[in-house]
Image: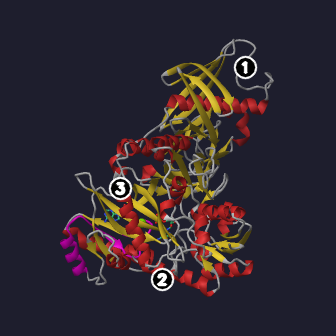
């Protein structure tokens, strides 16, 4: 086995590889960019080498620097992870030339599978079934149009050099072909520096089912079963599971044999994935076609690890050392069912636009590693970030992968929903709530899987509000009181929570929820009971801090909630989901916060919509000063005290970061 390897990647996959290396007694070397100087993957390795500035082109793609780092640290091999240099033939070659083992397939296999069109020609010769289409070298627009007409619409134009869901255009009718072709070629040139395309029949309601294969240097091949990755957005995977629902042993064996034939055809070595598109016929039968081969470890490999009890990175290292495959085909078994959810920094309600920001709060479920425990573990989290880390615009928007394992699909599904409910992220938008909606959608729950699942279920996936105003407000009030008690102790004379020796004390709160403002009234009774009136609800509010959050009773219901404050925004997490509510504690503003009265800051990153005042205006406490749009919600910024408006520091339409001072108020 190697003594030391260099991991030419970052984030969760670098951490993932480092964990196996450590377990096997192999030392690991991290490389990192400026942005990653204190990243988790740097700490996960035994050594680390700085390789350049934050943009990938100046660091993670600079392979001369990476090879120098390997030489300087005495690493014997390089693990490329996925993305970056993992499918770069020249890099694999350069490793060999530098006397380093590239932990991956031979350069010739990367090349053969690198271009979708060429690889399809190869697969055709190897007898692997292909989607009807055109993958020739002639790229004359007229010929491509004629081929599309012959295949029959709808068709899919794909950049031959494409990847990551980019460079694809679906075309519904002949008249639209020329324009789609031109636009696809433009994107292919700018993204991949190669404008060659291929054309495929657009399979209706297809499933994406891929086969994990492994080869060694002794000519042995196995397949580690399938993964169903049909749940996609923008042709990118959202949820992946194994085994594929509805897969029969006969079809599995057939697809496995086709995948092994594909690997054998290019003398493949190491971990690879053969992706198939599966057409579901009206008679219930399924027909599979080769789509592409990814010549690396895949993002979703943990679901395969979960159902086989194997560590695929360990297999990669062993095979790269020249060892034979640890197991043969008849020794491989499927146990239970596994699902992976990709937690990404993005806005599902805004066409999945990637989001950036800092993980101010990042809490996750208790994990029990099941890499080698064969069904023993239940929840696994692979990530490359910790609380306080930033999701920067330089790299992928994936925050973490959550993988669950159960005896069957129903159990895995329940565990996934439960695990997702325990993920609490504050500071940036994520798809966590969206993932929960997908998991609970009728299609996913009934394993009615295909790549159109998300658009089909859009009514239950988008624009939902999982927590109502009343619960959000009650949770926020409870958190405010808990914070104050923690701060001020239990001494009744310093407590500000309304305790009075005589009479009933009252306290008012202002909330903004879903663009609507709402007052709440909290009254303290002689007997110590708290009464809360908010919206349509009024009654006794009871709460207590427990080990698992705030145990809250209000409005005839009992909930366990968590509240994290970010400025005046309370992020409320409940069993059903999370929401945000803007809490304006009027009493607190009148009292303690006087010192802050001069500064009016954005409670979260967003856009300034309008100012309700101008410089020189006299305002009263509580008067609206400005309106911001953040996280798809409008927020009114109100005056915390009486005063005169000084200067407006932004203009309507300006993008502002959290904490940015919006205007000055002179007391
Ligand atoms: P998988 O099937 O493993 O999810 P993807 O095609 O989604 O494979 O790619 C895996 C990772 O590789 C992505 O998260 C992305 O970071 C990176 N990647 C893939 N293709 C590209 C590309 N063309 N340009 C940049 N990054 C890419
Ligand atoms: P990438 O290299 O970007 O991963 P793929 O060729 O693997 O590109 O295709 C990505 C996704 O696009 C597939 O998982 C599938 O959802 C969809 N897709 C690809 N080919 C077809 C097709 N012929 N018909 C319908 N959908 C397709
Ligand atoms: Mg693909």
Q: Residue at x 42, y 57 (%)?
A: 229
For residue 620, side relative to residue 487 (left or right): left
**Residue 451, disc:** 3
Residue 11 magenta-drawn? no
Return the residue nearer the eye: 601 or 96: 96
Kindly give the residue lying farthest to the front in the view shown: 330
Whether residues under marks 3 and 1 lie with C-beta atoms below 8 angstroms apart, the answer is no
Give coordinates of residue 517: x percent, y percent.
Answer: 51, 33
**Residue 499, disc:** 1
Q: Which residues are magenta?
A: 141-167
Give coordinates of residue 514: x percent, y percent.
Answer: 47, 38
Q: Residues within 10 Å of mark 1 (few under 14, many from 20)?
A: some
When the figure is inspected, residue 560 is found, relative to residue 317, above or below; the finding is above
| Quadrant assignment, res 511 | top right
Q: Label 2, on which residue? A: 108
Whether residues under marks 3 and 2 lie with C-beta atoms below 8 angstroms apart, the answer is no
Quadrant of the rendering where the C terminus is positioned: top right
Give coordinates of residue 271: x percent, y percent.
Answer: 52, 69
Quadrant of the rendering where the N terminus is positioned: bottom right
For residue 604, side relative to residue 230 (left or right): right
Which marked residue is nearer to the observer: mark 2 or mark 1? 2
Marks 3 and 1, how far apart in space? 58 Å
Give coordinates of residue 142: x percent, y percent.
Answer: 22, 80
Which marked residue is nearer to the observer: mark 3 or mark 1? 3
For residue 401, side relative to residue 288 (left or right): right
């Amino acid at each position: 086995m190697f003594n030391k390897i260099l991991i030419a990647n970052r984030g969760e996959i670098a951490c993932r590889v480092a964990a196996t290396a450590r377990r096997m007694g192999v030392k690991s070397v991290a490389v990192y960019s400026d942005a990653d100087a204190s990243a988790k993957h740097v700490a996960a390795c035994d050594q680390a080498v700085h390789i350049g500035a934050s943009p990938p082109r100046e660091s993670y793609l600079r392979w001369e620097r990476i090879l120098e780092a390997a030489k300087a640290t005495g690493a014997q091999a390089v693990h490329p992870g996925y993305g970056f240099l993992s499918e770069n033939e020249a890099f694999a070659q350069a490793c060999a030339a530098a006397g380093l083992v590239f932990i991956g397939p031979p350069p010739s296999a990367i090349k053969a599978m690198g271009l979708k069109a060429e690889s399809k020609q190869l697969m055709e010769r190897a007898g692997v079934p292909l989607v009807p289409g055109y993958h020739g070298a002639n790229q004359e627009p007229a010929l491509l149009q004629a081929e599309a007409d012959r295949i029959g619409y709808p068709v899919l134009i794909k950049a031959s050099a494409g990847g990551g869901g980019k460079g694809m255009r679906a075309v519904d009718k002949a008249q639209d072909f020329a324009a789609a072709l031109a636009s696809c070629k433009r994107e292919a040139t700018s993204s991949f520096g190669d404008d060659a395309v291929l054309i495929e029949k657009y399979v209706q309601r297809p499933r994406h089912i891929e086969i994990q294969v492994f080869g060694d240097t002794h000519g042995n091949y196995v397949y580690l079963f399938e993964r169903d990755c049909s749940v996609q957005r923008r042709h990118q995977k959202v949820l992946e599971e194994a085994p594929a629902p509805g897969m029969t042993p006969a079809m599995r064996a057939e697809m496995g044999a086709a995948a092994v034939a594909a690997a054998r055809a290019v003398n493949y070595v190491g971990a690879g994935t053969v992706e198939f598109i599966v057409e579901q016929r009206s008679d219930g039968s399924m027909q599979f076609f080769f789509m592409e081969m990814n010549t690396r470890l895949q993002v979703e490999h943990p679901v395969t690890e979960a159902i086989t009890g194997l560590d695929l990175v360990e297999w990669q290292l062993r095979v790269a050392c020249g060892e034979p495959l640890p197991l043969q085909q008849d020794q491989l078994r499927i146990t239970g069912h596994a699902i992976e959810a990709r937690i990404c920094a993005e806005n599902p309600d805004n066409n999945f636009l990637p989001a950036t920001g800092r993980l101010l709060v990042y809490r996750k479920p208790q994990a029990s590693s099941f890499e080698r425990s064969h069904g023993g573990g239940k929840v696994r989290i692979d990530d490359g970030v910790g609380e306080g880390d930033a999701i920067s615009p330089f790299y992928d928007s994936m925050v973490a992968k959550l993988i669950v394992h159960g005896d069957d699909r129903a159990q895995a599904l329940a565990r996934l929903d439960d695990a997702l409910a325990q993920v609490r992220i504050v500071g940036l938008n994520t798809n966590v709530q969206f993932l929960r909606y997908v998991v609970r959608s009728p299609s996913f729950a009934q394993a009615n899987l295909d790549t159109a699942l998300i658009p089909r279920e859009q009514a239950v996936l988008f624009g939902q509000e999982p927590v109502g105003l009343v619960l959000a407000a009650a949770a926020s009030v409870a958190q405010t009181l808990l914070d104050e008690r923690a701060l001020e102790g239990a001494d009744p004379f310093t407590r500000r929570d309304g305790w009075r020796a005589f009479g009933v004390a009252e306290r008012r709160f202002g909330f903004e929820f879903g663009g609507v403002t709402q007052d709440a009234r909290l009254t303290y009774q002689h007997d110590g009971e708290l009464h809360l009136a908010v919206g349509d609800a009024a009654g006794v509010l009871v709460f207590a801090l427990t080990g698992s959050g705030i145990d809250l009773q209000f409005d005839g219901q009992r909930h366990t909630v968590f509240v994290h404050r970010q400025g005046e925004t309370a992020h409320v997490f409940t069993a059903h989901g999370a929401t945000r509510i803007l809490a304006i504690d009027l009493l607190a503003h009148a009292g303690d916060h006087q010192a802050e009265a001069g500064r009016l800051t954005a409670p979260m990153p967003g856009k300034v919509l309008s100012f309700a005042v101008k410089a020189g205006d006299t305002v009263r406490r509580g008067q609206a000063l400005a309106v911001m749009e953040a996280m798809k919600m409008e927020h009114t910024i109100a005056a915390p005290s009486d005063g005169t408006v000084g200067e407006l520091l932004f203009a309507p339409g300006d993008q502002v970061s959290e904490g940015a001072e919006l205007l000055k108020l002179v007391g």
